[in-house]
């Protein structure tokens, strides 16, 4: 393993608040000085060039399965408490390697290609319009809590046939599970909470699936239940696990997509004006906006067989952070990568990954992003950031998203007023 001299500071420190707020200068440095970088901070490789990122994601000596090793390392008491959550996470297609992955993905593709998944345009439009109606009359909102979080939550619930009245319960269970999935460091009771959230969530989806098997109502859940490859179908446990995965995979990423996209436009007023004036170019513009500051900084792999990447040897067992947002700014692939160009074409960004694990929800995510951004800009063309309350980034390395983004909906006139006068608006 390469070891830096004791005096050298880290070339990349993901926990540095300045890097979290704007990781792109650090990515540029890594791309130029050490594109396959051993991070002493992360005890992992950090890969930033487009070609290397692709090569890792396409390499068959890279694994996504990491839970079993973790589970085996737990003290017996903790392992006993974690049984259910580990069981279901191990059934996520996202955490499986071939041949298990190949089998499950073939079956899932049938459901994700069906019309119930891909014809969500009018549902998304209704949800977005409903949320926008709810905002009208207000002068300031938190764009994340009041809009970006709510769009994908309602879309995923509608997709799976979960009544909207269940939102707060589902959110509480998901939050409990997330302390484990996102690896929260400070939660003392994280195993107990995660297991409790998982049991409740699994129990709920199991009932929903049984109900759907009886009444055969049309929709994505029915397509999942019926999906088969030469007669091979998902087991009941796989169905439950996939419902939980869809809930997680489709939520935070899409929230980040919508939040980062509006922030990018607000920081580029000339481009925002162009966006508002050219609705016919929404699709191309949204691809560029997500390339520019995408919703996941990176994804993780574990090396299964020693091999070379650039001038470095990756050893079996090493962890690799594959930085998608860095690759999407690589000058070897994108002309003037740090310039927002809403007409950029082609735009081969890696926001949805590549290779065998490429995002299965890409069509839905794109539809949500386009409809949310276009409808919001049409309804509130004068939206602006609040100078006294800048957006706050999440304290996380892998997801790239905002915790809060206070905005004025009706223009900048009130920016001159003292900020305490805004609190009760
Ligand atoms: C902006 C929104 C989204 C982004 C940026 C995104 C991004 C990604 C990425 C990068 C991967 C590959 C992960 C890897 O290689 O380890 C992935 C996988 C996946 N995504 Fe998404 N995703 C989004 C939305 C969705 C939605 C809405 C759904 C479903 C409703 C979804 C379902 C999945 C699934 C099931 C996988 C695993 C595929 C596999 O392992 O074969 N995603 N996503």
Image: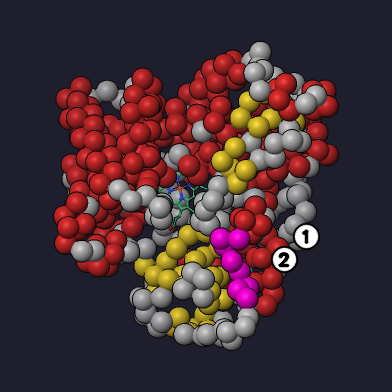
Quarter of the image for the C terminus: give it: top right
Image check: 237 left or right of 396? left
Give the residues in magenta: 9-16
Of the two numbered discs 1 and 2 on the same chain, state the one appearing first in sequence. 2
Determine the image quadrant of residue 176.
top left
Going 78% across and 42% down the picture, which residue do you hit? 268
Is residue 190 visible to the viewer in this orientation of the structure?
Answer: yes
What residue is shown with label 1? 336
**x and y percentages locating residue 46 in the rendered image:** 54, 70
**x and y percentages locating residue 377 in the rendered image:** 70, 28
Structure colour scheme: secondary structure
Vertical placement of 37 versus 244: above or below? below
Q: Secondary structure at mark 2?
A: loop
What residue is shown with label 2? 331
How many marks do you count on the picture?
Answer: 2
Going 70% across and 43% down the picture, which residue do you hit? 264
Going 16% across and 62% down the picture, which residue do you hit? 76
Image check: 161 left or right of 373? left
Q: Are marks 1 and 2 in contact (CB under 8 Å)?
A: yes
Determine the image quadrant of residue 59.
bottom left
Vertical placement of 184 versus 63: above or below? above
Going 76% across and 61% down the picture, which residue do you hit? 335
Residue density around tag 2, few if under 14, some if 14–19, many if 20 or more, within 10 Å: some
Numbered badge on residue 206: none
């Amino acid at each position: 393993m390469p070891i830096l001299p004791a005096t050298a500071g880290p070339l990349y420190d993901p926990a540095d608040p300045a890097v979290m707020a704007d990781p792109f200068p650090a990515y540029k440095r890594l791309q130029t000085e050490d594109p396959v970088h051993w991070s002493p901070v992360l005890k992992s490789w950090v890969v930033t060039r487009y070609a290397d990122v692709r090569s890792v994601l396409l390499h068959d000596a890279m694994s996504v399965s990491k839970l079993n090793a973790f589970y085996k390392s737990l003290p017996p008491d903790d392992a006993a408490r974690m049984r259910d959550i580990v069981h279901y996470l191990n059934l996520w297609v996202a955490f499986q390697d071939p041949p298990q992955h190949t089998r499950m993905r073939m079956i899932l593709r049938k459901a994700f290609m069906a019309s119930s998944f891909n014809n969500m345009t009018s549902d998304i439009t209704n949800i977005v319009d409903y949320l926008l109606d709810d905002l009208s009359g207000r002068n300031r909102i938190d764009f994340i809590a009041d809009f970006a979080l709510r769009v994908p939550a309602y879309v995923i619930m509608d997709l799976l046939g979960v009544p909207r009245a269940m939102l707060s319960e589902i959110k509480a269970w998901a939050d409990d599970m997330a302390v484990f999935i996102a690896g929260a460091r400070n939660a003392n009771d994280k195993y107990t909470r995660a297991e409790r959230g998982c049991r409740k969530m699994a129990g709920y989806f199991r009932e929903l699936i049984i109900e759907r098997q009886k009444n055969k109502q049309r929709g994505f859940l029915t397509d999942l239940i019926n999906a088969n490859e030469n007669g091979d179908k998902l087991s009941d446990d796989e169905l439950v696990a996939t419902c939980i995965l869809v809930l997680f995979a489709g939520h935070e990423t899409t929230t980040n997509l919508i939040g980062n996209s509006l922030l990018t436009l607000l920081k580029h007023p000339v481009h925002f004006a162009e966006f508002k004036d050219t609705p016919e170019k929404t699709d191309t513009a949204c691809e560029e906006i997500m390339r520019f500051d995408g919703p996941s900084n990176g994804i993780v792999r574990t090396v299964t067989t020693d091999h070379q990447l650039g001038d470095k040897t990756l050893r079996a067992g090493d962890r690799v952070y594959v930085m998608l947002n860095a690759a999407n700014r690589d000058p070897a692939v994108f002309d003037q990568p740090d310039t927002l160009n809403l007409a950029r074409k082609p735009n081969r960004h890696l926001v949805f990954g590549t290779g065998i694990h490429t995002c299965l929800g890409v069509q839905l995510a794109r539809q949500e992003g386009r409809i949310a951004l276009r409808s919001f800009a049409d309804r509130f063309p004068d939206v602006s950031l609040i100078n006294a309350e800048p957006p706050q980034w999440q304290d996380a390395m892998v997801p790239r998203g905002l915790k809060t983004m206070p905005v004025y909906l009706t223009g900048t006139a009130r920016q001159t007023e003292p900020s305490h006068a805004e609190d009760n608006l």
